[in-house]
Amino acid sequence: MRAPGFWWQTPPAVPARLLQPFGALYGAATLARMRRAGASAGVPVICVGNFVAGGAGKTPTVLALAALLAESGESPFVLSRGYGGREAGPLRVEPGRHGPADIGDEPLLMAHRVPVVVARDRPAGAALARSLGASLVLMDDGLQNPSLRKDLRLAVVDGATGIGNGLCLPAGPLRAPIAGQLSETDAVVVIGAGGPGDAVAGLAQAAGRPVLRAALSVMPEVEARLDGLSVIAASGIGRPEKFAATLRQAGARLAGERRYVDHHAYTARDVSTLIAEAKAMDCAVAVTEKDMVKLAPLWPAEARDRLLAVPVRLRFADEDAIGALLRRVVSGSGAAAAAHP
């Protein structure tokens, strides 16, 4: 399902206003759920979530945090629900054994860089991670999930879209009212520039929550290859236009776009269509890392030179600030100290 366009229109459009009463009910129920007490994991838990439905940059944020924690001597494990996969878990993801249909595309992507446990039951997943040697759990998504007690709650915001029209599902993209969600969040990570992200940053600062700025960049070796390259941008992510913009910023020339729904399950027919279009336009097919884990097994070897994955990495503008938050969690100071230094 793709998010309806009126979610991002400000002031809210007529469809949003008509749905606003339903959104108020949904948001109130979600906020009440967020405020429930969770179970202890036995190790610190850092939750990386977002205020809205859809993509905001959680996966690269989780990977960046995992790298920082590993550099400091920690053994972080990612805990994911495994959206889109058939396995309920708890299980540790093994890239050579599990595919995206088993455990979802994002867990498979992350498992190439950090240990990942998939579990619909988050406490059971955290227990498995701890038994496997996790010194800390990075909870991928789940800001609104109360099952585990969280030591640090980070909300990721896309600078270009922010919180859309500011209304709750189904009237807008918010999962619960922004003021209530900020009260259940310890810091906000704004990725990329944009007025909508600046507005959320202002709300966070007014609520006494630290704001961490971050940016995504293409890996240098891939950026060098993209410069001047003609490509079809193919993606099944929450905001495909963001991927197209990333390609343009890297110097690529867009010959066309293929936009699929988030977490799209690619088929052999999809692959044949993409290859045929690339040959007709004499160009490559550029895809996100998330899409690559699903496309690579289907892509024929003889056309492999036309498929290009575009990995991105997240960097915090102030690494000392995020480092201080992480150290407080690891040292046992907890979320309250992190939120109010």
Image (spheres, rainbow, N blue to C red):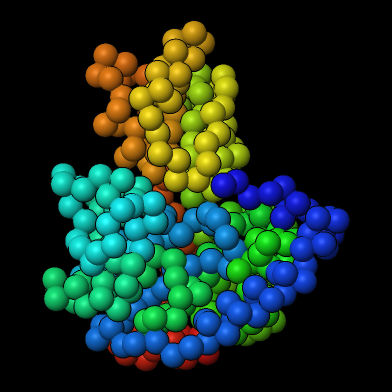
Q: Nearer the viewer, residue 5 or 10?
A: 5
Give above or below for 222 relative to 194: above
Give above or below for 233 relative to 284: below
Q: Position of residue 314 (x, y in %)?
A: 44, 54
**Rendered image quadrant of residue 248:** top right
Q: Position of residue 97 (x, y in %)?
A: 16, 46
What is the total number of numbered labels drawn onto the structure image? 0
Residue at the (38%, 30%) spot, across then down: 267
Q: Nearer the viewer, residue 45 or 260?
A: 260
50 relative position to 306: left or right:
right
Q: Position of residue 289 (x, y in %)?
A: 38, 41
Residue at the (65%, 73%) spot, across then down: 26
Tell me if I can see residue 10 in this picture: no
337 relative position to 257: left or right:
left
Residue at the (41%, 73%) spot, across then down: 47
Give above or below for 314 relative to 286: below
Give above or below for 170 relative to 113: below
Residue at the (54%, 28%) spot, across then down: 258
Tell me if I can see residue 195 in this picture: yes
